[in-house]
Image: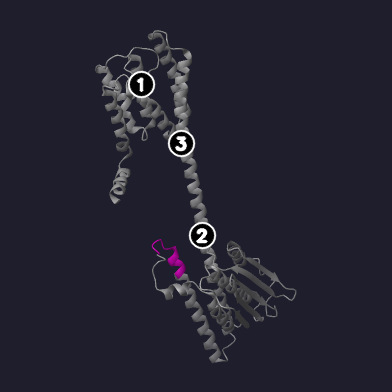
Amino acid sequence: MKSPQVAGQLWRRLDVTVRDLPLGILFLVASFLPGLRGQGTVVGDLPTRPFDALAVVVLALECFPLAVRRRWPVVSLALVTCGFALDQLRGYHSVAGTALPLVLISAGSHLEHRRRTAVILLSVAYVPLAIALSRLGSGGETPEEFVTFYLVLALAWGAGAWLRSTRVAEAERRERVAAETRTAERTRIARELHDVVTHHVTAMVVQAEAARYLTAAPERLEQSLSAVSDTGRRAITDLRHLLDLLNPDHDTGTGSAEAKDSRTPAVGRVLTLVEQTRRAGQPVDFTEQGTPPASTGSADLVAYRVVQEALTNALKYAHGSRTSVQVRHGEREITVEVSTDGSGSHSAAAVGSGRGLTGLRERVNLLGGDFSADSGTDGGFTVRARIPVGSTS
C-alpha cells in the first residue's frame, strides 16, 4: 500500500515540465502508429498525404511544446498552433493535431496575463487559415463547418478559463479561511491573556496597596507580601502555559495528567480563586451545589473564567464589598452566579463595558448557554451564566 503512495509523492516532486513531457511523447508515438496514421483532425477537405521530412518538424511542433504547456503556456500555445496549421495545410492529418484543444484548455487555465490579446490573435489567425484551406481543397467544406470547428476551439478555451476561475476561487476561499482561523486564534489568545493576566495583576495591585498600610502590623504585612508573591508565581505559570500554546512545536498530547489538570482549571478549583480574592481583602462567600459530571467538555473551564472575571471586577470596581459566588452543577448544565452588593470603596457602574465580560458572553454563547451582567440600583452588580455541559469550544 505504501509503494504507490511513495511513487505518487516522488512523481509530484518532479518538475512540472518533466511531468508534462510524457503526454507529448504519447501523441508523437501515436502519430506514427500504422493504424492511427492519417486519422487525426481534418479541417477542410485536403487529401491525406504520407509523412515526409517536413512532417517530422510538424509533429515536433505539435507534441514537444506540451511539456511546457503549464510553465510557459504562451510559448506552448504558439508552437502547437503553428504545427497544427502546417499539419492541415500539408494534409498530414496526424493524431498530434488533437493536441490543439488540449493546449487551449491548458492555456485558458494557466495563462495569467494578456489573455484577451491571446484570444484575439488566435481568432484573427484562424481566418486566413480557414480561407487557405478552403481554396486548397476541392470546395466540399462549407463555411458552417469552419465556424463549427472554431466554436469547438472556443469551447476548449472556455473550459480552461472555467478551471482557472475555479482554482482562483478555491485559493481565495483557502486564504479567507486561513485569515479567519488566524483571527479566531488571536482572539482566543487575547481572551486567555486578559482572563489570566487581569485577574492575577489586579489581585497583586490590591494586595500591594493594602501592604502600604500594614507597616505597623508586621505579621499582616508579611502575609500580604506573601500573597503578592504567590499570585505573581501563579501568573508566571499561567503565562508560560500560554506561551507554550503559541510555540509551533507544542504538543498537546504530551505531559503528565497532573500538569494537564492544572492547566485546565475545573469548577471544583474555583475555591482557589475565592481564597486568593479573600487574601486580597475582598469578603467572598462561596457555595457549590451538586456533583460535577464525569465529562463536562469546555463548560468547566468557561465557568471558571466567569468566576475569575467576576471576582476580578469585584476587586477593581467594588473593593471591600460583600461578594457571593454560587456554582450549581446539573446533569446538563452548570449555573454560575456572582453578585456584589456595591458597599465597598469603588463604584461598580463601569462593569460590563470592558473586553472581559464581552469575551465571556461570546464563550458562553458559543456553547449554547446564556450570560448576563447587570448593575444593581445599590451600586452592586450580578453576573449570571448558564453553561451547557458536554460542549467543546
Residue 20 in view of the camera: yes
Distance between the alpha carbons at the discs numbered 1 and 2: 56 Å
Q: Is residue 36 above or below residue 68?
A: above
- Mark 1 vs mark 3, CA separation in Å: 24 Å
Q: Position of residue 260 (x, y in %)?
A: 44, 72
Residue 80 in the image, given as x and y percentages of width and height: 35, 25
Q: Secondary structure at mark 1?
A: helix
| Foreground residue among 229 and 240 | 240
Are there few (<14), some (14-19), or many (20+) residues within 10 Å of tag 1? many
| Residue carrying label 1 | 84
- The amino acid type found where label 2 is placed reads Arg
| Gap in angstroms between the C-alphas marked 3 and 2 | 34 Å
Residue receiving disc 2: 186
Q: Residues in magenta? A: 241-250
In the rendered structure, find residue 163 and report the number of the disc placed on it: 3
Residue density around tag 3, few if under 14, some if 14–19, many if 20 or more, within 10 Å: some
Residue at point 31% right, 40% down? 15
Asked if the residue at tag 2 contacts the one at tag 1, i.e. Cβ–Cβ closer than 8 Å, the answer is no
Disc 2 crowd, CA 10 A, few/some/many (<14, 14-19, 20+)? few
| Residue 97 placement: quadrant | top left
Amino acid type indicated by mark 1: Phe
Q: Mark 3 or 2 closer to N-term? A: 3
Q: Is residue 76 within the magenta segment?
A: no
SS for callout 3: helix
Q: Residue at x 60, y 68 (%)?
A: 387
Of the pair 366 and 128, the residue shown nearer to us: 366
Taking the image as drawn, is residue 236 in sight? Answer: no
Asked where in the image residue 156 lies, by quadrant, the reply is top left
Q: Position of residue 238 (x, y in %)?
A: 48, 72
User: Magenta stretch containing residue 242, yes or no?
Assistant: yes
